[in-house]
Amino acid sequence: MAAFTFGLAVPNDEPFDELLPRVRRLDAGSGIDRLWVADERFRRDPWVTMGLLAAETRRLELATAVTDPYIRHPALTANAIATVADASGGRAILGLGAGASGFGALSIERPAPATAIRETIELSRRLWSSTGAFSYEGRQVSFKDSRLGFLPPAPIPIWIAGRGPQILELAGELADGVLVASFVDGPLLEHSLERVAAGESRRRPGLRPLERASWAYVAIDPDREAARTAVRTGIAVAMWGSRPIVKQLGIELPAELTQLMEETAYSVEHDVIGRAAALIPEWLIDQCSIAGTAEECAEKIGRLAGHGFGHLAAWIFPTPGRSLDQMVDDLVEQVIPAVRTTATG
């Protein structure tokens, strides 16, 4: 079995002079292997961030976490990630999802996301390999008689992140990797893996075996309740983004939380998302986060490995009085060695 690897979310919500020293330190170390860069409107632009990270690193892989088929034309996204691959010596990954962030502010509709993602993948792979002009006509995506002005140095892996059944099945069928978003334990994880497996049963010939990763909200603290409180914000973001399919996923949210999401425009600003976070029930924290002591976190990640996962993309939520750097150090120095020791023991 391949070694379990770890990635770190870059939410694009902190100044570069705080981010870059951490990234340089991680690039020189051996615990973190990948940076997942958020495309969250209206934070720092992900493509500017990835270009800067490509210049500042030599080892870490750089992935979008995640972009979507709607915020920009898929051909422009394919061109952008190919540019990152060129700048980084082939260390780029295109992470795709259905999208939600900023759509209301920009009056963007989201028709048929599974279809749009499928067509984005098909168009991107042709753009990265075609030396002549071509046209592509899908239901959601079209491209007429053109090509990229350069080709990436190697095929770019495409990962699909999702919670909904259609998106997870599409990942199993078509992607290089699936990023199971938010669900890390219990029935929610089991249902997600069933959908991935259903997609794998239709997997196209010639694709390499699907990689599985977990997109998880992580907080590490000797005070487990402080850690569990810290990840509430991430879970609230997940539930809000998945509001149209929450009931389909078997999640029964408190009535007050449902009302808040129906009557308030989505926002990651604290005065909005903080209200939602306070209403997240305890059972949902269990199934949608890796939060607690270092030992508890390592044990939960070990269970993910037992489900066939090979990578953890950690979105870290510091607890009061602890910095992000301190929690990253705990992940690298305490949690990761414990997971790897267990995996090889």
Image: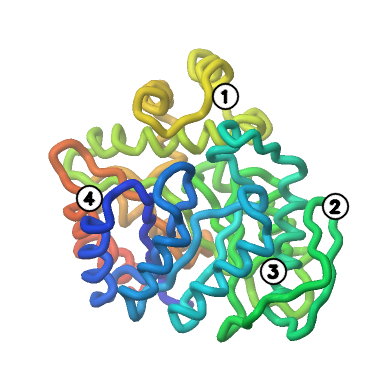
Camera-near label (1 vs 2) is: 2
Question: Could you tell me the amino acid type at mark 3?
Answer: Ser
Q: CA distance from mark 3 to mark 1?
A: 37 Å
Tell me what residue is drawn at x 43 percent, y 60 percent. Answer: 36
- In terms of sequence position, does the residue under pointer 1 or pointer 4 come before the other? 1
Question: Could you tell me the amino acid type at mark 2?
Answer: Arg
Judge whether 317 appears above or below 332 on screen.
above
Judge whether 44 appears above or below 206 on screen.
above
Camera-near label (2 vs 4) is: 2
Label 1 neighbour load within 10 Å: few <14, some 14-19, many 20+: few
Please tell me the numbered disc located at residue 139.
2
Camera-near label (3 vs 4) is: 3
- In terms of sequence position, does the residue under pointer 2 or pointer 3 come before the other? 3
Tell me what residue is drawn at x 38 percent, y 55 percent. Answer: 9
Q: Position of residue 71 (x, y in %)?
A: 61, 48
Q: Secondary structure at mark 3?
A: helix
Pointer 1 residue = 252
Pointer 4 residue = 324
- In terms of sequence position, does the residue under pointer 2 or pointer 4 come before the other? 2
- In terms of sequence position, does the residue under pointer 1 or pointer 2 come before the other? 2
- Horizontal side of residue 335 vs 139, given as left or right: left
- The reply to whether the C-beta atoms of the residues labelled 1 and 4 are less than 8 Å apart is no
Camera-near label (1 vs 4) is: 4
Q: Secondary structure at mark 1?
A: loop
Q: Could you say which quadrant of the image residue 339 lies in? A: bottom left
Question: Could you tell me the amino acid type at mark 4?
Answer: Leu
Q: CA distance from mark 3 to mark 4?
A: 35 Å
Q: Secondary structure at mark 4?
A: helix
